[in-house]
Amino acid sequence: MQHIEIYTDGACKGNPGPGGWGVLLRSGDQEKALYGGEADTTNNRMELTAAIEALKALRRPVIADIYTDSQYLIKGLEEWLPAWKARGWQTADRKSVKNRDLWEQLDDLAAQHRLTWHWVKGHAGNPGNIRADALANQGVQQVLAAGGETATQR
């Protein structure tokens, strides 16, 4: 199996508001950058969308290290998701899980690969995280320039 590094980030101007997601995929000396955005979204939805879009871009199963500055994403995958599924997509206090559509999609895509998730401090000099953040903000700008239309750049 091929080993790759993936950096993901989400951004939102207002919460909710126009948002963007960014992905940097690296395999050896090859890189691929992806970004996109939505007109009316939240930062958490953009963080999840970045991870989903990264995994959708993979053409075959891989071994990947995925880096994110989102505690929501890391805790959701490592702590909350198994319990949500066991409770029929309910939180501990019996409320519906927010962003369930995206969590289900991410869970299905992640099952196709061998993934290790890593939290990195945002805006702390990590080159991959800085690049993913810039791509996410580019997604926001693309949405704003398109007059609020959803946009994706591959």
Image (cartoon, grey):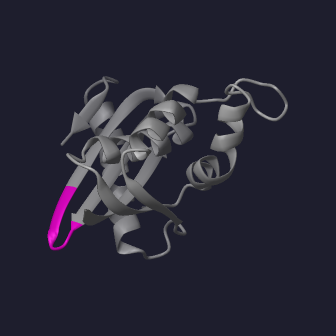
Q: Residue furthest bottom?
A: 125
Residue 12 in view, yes or no: no
Nearest the viewer among 27 and 149 is 27
- Could you say where residue 18 lies in the image, as x and y percent from the top left? 44, 33
90 sits to left or right of 37: right
Relative to 68, residue 81 above or below: above
Relative to 141, residue 95 above or below: above
- Tell me the residue at 19%/56% (across/down): 32
Residue 41 in view, yes or no: yes
70 sits to left or right of 87: left
Q: Residue furthest left?
A: 30
58 sits to left or right of 77: left
Q: Residue furthest front?
A: 1
- Could you say where residue 12 lies in the image, as x and y percent from the top left? 48, 41
Give the magenta part as a residue range.
Answer: 27-32
- Tell me the residue at 32%/52% (across/down): 23
- Tell me the residue at 64%/29% (across/down): 98
The quarter of the image holding the C terminus is: top left
- Could you say where residue 47 lies in the image, as x and y percent from the top left? 48, 45
The quarter of the image holding the N terminus is: bottom left
- Could you say where residue 133 lies in the image, as x and y percent from the top left? 39, 57
